Image (cartoon, rainbow, N blue to C red):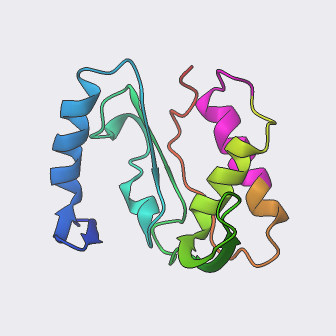
Amino acid sequence: MDEALCTTNGTLLDDDLTVLMQGIAASAAQLFWFCDACYSGGFVDQGSGSSLPENVVLIASSLETQKSEDALRIETDKETGKMAMFYQGTGTRWLKAAVDGGGLPPRATHQQLFDALAAERAKDKRARSAIAAPERLPLP
């Protein structure tokens, strides 16, 4: 079954996304992709049958059977003092907190990043979705 991302420009099928990722990964030592979308765990191919290149690691904000979560954010710009209101994927908020929190070493492994995301999710009392990652996660 095909998985797809719905964008403002249309739909991007998983097969098309894999071709794009293969092109990018061909010129990269490693590629990390965090997908914060409903049912995004469906993009995580488990085990050796993965269609993504070996140097690509994907972590998804929900399992393939779950809707992702959004949160209304209200923040004040530190420089201008103006307030901004926007929606942000909860998984993206967890990722930002994990990276900005200072608990990760400068050259964190993908496993350390996954663990930091899981820790941020555990602190979120409203969290209902899980985090999905492939079995072959521990790239350097």
Q: Considering the image in quadrants, where does the C terminus appear? A: top right
Q: Is residue 137 left or right of residue 120?
A: left
Residue drawn 63% across the image and 52% down it: 95
Residue drawn 54% across the image and 78% down it: 86
Where residue 129 sits in the image (x, y, percent)?
63, 71
Span colored in magenta: 105-119
Q: Considering the image in quadrants, where does the N terminus appear? A: bottom left
Q: Nearer the viewer, residue 109 or 134?
A: 109
Residue drawn 64% across the image and 61% down it: 93
Disc tally is 0
Where residue 36 sits in the image (x, y, percent)?
48, 62
Image: 29 above or below 56:
above
Residue at the extreme front? 80
Q: Is residue 6 magenta?
A: no
Where residue 25 sits in the image (x, y, percent)?
28, 28
Q: Is residue 107 magenta?
A: yes
Provide the major secondary structure of the magenta segment.
helix
